[in-house]
Image: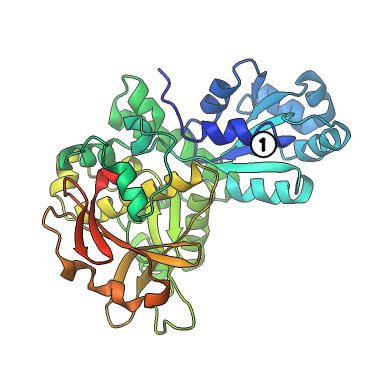
Amino acid sequence: MYIQREEQVVVNKVGGQFKTLLVTGPRQVGKSTMLKHVAPGRPYISLDLITARELADSDPSLFLQRYKPPVLIDEIQYAPTLFPAIKSIVDQDENNGLFWLTGSQQFHLMQHVSESLAGRIAILRLLGLSQRELQGWLKQKPFLPTENYLESCRKRTSIALDKVFHFIWKGSYPMLWTADVDWEIFYNSYFQTYLQRDVRNLTKVSNEMDFVRFVRAVAGRIGQQINFNSLANDVGISQPTAKAWLSVLEASGLVYFLPPYFNNRLKRLVKSPKLYFTDTGLASFLSGWLTEQAIEAGTMSGAFLENYAIIEILKGYRNIGREPSLFYYRDTDGREIDLIIEEAGMLYPIEIKKTSSPRASMVKSFDVLPKEVRGKGALLSFVNEDVPLSANVSAVPFFYL
């Protein structure tokens, strides 16, 4: 069973406009599956295969003679020696769509791409299945709480609180939705097979159990500002090690850093980014919340809901080929805004609450944003339809994401 992906539209568009296309993202989010679905006749080779990887490393020219374009090469980060050889081919061939590539280690990928294929490649970023994809709500604009957007969502089918927390618990990896797979076994295998292997390729981990404790500690901090001192002390490692390991998680696409909003008119801001997992199911598994009921009733329910909403909004933009300008606001006076979407010079403030009785007092911090650049705000909550809270703020249900 294949679930239609929003990003297919962009792949079809840019895949024929550029000589090379690279789709990055965490492992198992469906990068190669999507590309195979878009172009089922395109030859495919995975560098997860040792024999293919060895040939690509030892003789990239021979590898590309054997796997001639147009071709789909999976996990390209395992053979960075291919990039100069690919550059040589695309410089001589006038056709578009020669190489479709996937990769799951963004830092090393971008380094080699910038060195060899700058200006010759389209780059898309894919995350796991979105709420929209699971519900079949495709070809819609990314979330922005304007009146036009809210109007476009009013015909959607309502999603109740328990179903939202089912999405949060189950996570977004396609295999969990398309096959009969045990949730706990899947995430345990994912962590052991993919995460730890990728970590070994990116950095030296002297004590594997320290790293396991570190990742679990990170998962327990979703929605919080990054505090390397606290994180390092809790795990018993140095701050430089904590920074290096967190960079690995980001490079693997498993965590997302939400930066603070700052301009010259808003002073005394806290400057540390907030941390979220790009898959809430993995965060649930790692932090020990093993059922959807436990998450919904537990002390981290608000954090999981915030994580879910922000990543859903991020997916909506990435799935149309855009990287949005997302921020949070917090100052030393305790005023907070969970999310700010900056779009066309306007700031759209978003608050995220586990409530079915939203009140205007819940969004009073929106007033810290200058009126002349403040767009319509939203309080994401468990209402059944969008409800005005003031002239410029509405309570919005989670199924509008």
Q: Nearer the viewer, residue 38 or 246?
A: 38
Residue 149 visible? The answer is yes
Left or right, 290 with respect to 371, comes to: left
Q: Nearer the viewer, residue 219 or 388?
A: 388
Residue lying at 22% horizontally and 51% vertically, measured from the top left: 386
Please identify the quadrant where the N terminus is shown. Answer: top left
The quarter of the picture where residue 357 lies is bottom left
Q: Compared with residue 151, is residue 63 higher up or lower down, i.e. above or below?
A: above
Q: Compared with residue 381, is residue 225 higher up or lower down, i.e. above or below?
A: below
Colouring scheme, one of rainbow, by chain, secondary structure, one colour: rainbow
Residue extending furthest toward the top: 41
Where is residue 200? Give x, y as percent: 55, 44
The quarter of the picture where residue 269 lies is bottom left
The quarter of the picture where residue 187 lies is top left
Graded by Cα atoms within 10 Å as few (under 14), some (14 to 19) or many (20 or more), the crowding at tag 1 reads many
Residue extending furthest toward the right: 92
Residue lying at 64% horizontally and 38% vertically, measured from the top left: 22
Q: Which of 212 and 67 is in front in this view?
A: 67
Left or right, 40 with respect to 93, comes to: left
Where is residue 299? Give x, y as percent: 17, 55
Task: Write down the residue under mark 1.
Answer: 21
Where is residue 64? Give x, y as percent: 79, 25
Residue 284 visible? The answer is no
Residue lying at 39% horizontally and 26% vertically, measured from the top left: 175
Left or right, 244 with respect to 140, comes to: right
Residue type for callout 1: Leu
Where is residue 334? Give x, y as percent: 27, 78
Left or right, 213 with respect to 388, comes to: right
